Amino acid sequence: MILHNRQTFLLSLAFGVFIAFIPFILKLRRDPFDAAGSYAIWWIGFFFVSVIMGFRMPRQVKKVAFGVGFGLPLALIGYFVVTPNSANLWPRSLILGTVIGLPPAFVGAYLGRFLRGSNNLPE
């Protein structure tokens, strides 16, 4: 499957948003940042989706990592739009969501690329 840069980014962003909404759907707590299970779901989910997508698209690992990693902040923006009463600390939530989402996404994407054996591919 050959995808262009924008399509790769949007596909990985869609997967990231889906993973980010899992704790909201399961309703682990009213605020997902209070539940330890939310962090486990996010880290494991972002990591494995990034590994798979990095393996499948080794030339576009940066797009994959940024797309999956920014899925959590985008999901939080959607959550704040739907429930405006919970948006009193939205800047801090977005920063925290970015800090939580990007590291496992980057590690997973580059691990997938490494497993594919495509370390010397041009960007």
Image: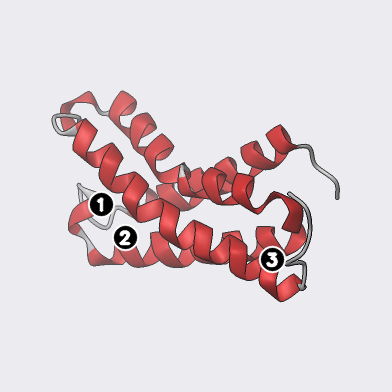
Q: Is residue 53 above or below residue 96?
A: below
Residue 7 coordinates in the image, percent (x, y): 72, 36
For the residues labelled 3 and 1, say whether their Cβ atoms are less than 8 Å apart.
no
Does residue 22 appear in this view?
no
Query: In front here: 32 or 16?
Result: 16
Q: Is residue 111 left or right of residue 26?
A: right
For the residues labelled 1 and 2, say whether their Cβ atoms are less than 8 Å apart.
yes
Query: Which residue is found at the position 52% from the left and 58% from the top?
Result: 106
Q: Is residue 84 left or right of residue 113?
A: left
Query: Which residue is found at the position 55% from the left and 65% from the top?
Result: 108
Residue type at tag 2: Ser
Q: Is residue 33 left or right of residue 20?
A: left
Check the image and name the residue furthest to the right: 1
Q: Which residue position is annotated with label 3?
A: 113
Residue type at tag 1: Pro
Residue type at tag 3: Arg
Q: Which residue position is annotated with label 1?
A: 32
Mark 2 to mark 3: distance in Å? Answer: 27 Å
Q: Which residue position is annotated with label 2?
A: 38
Coloration of the structure image? secondary structure
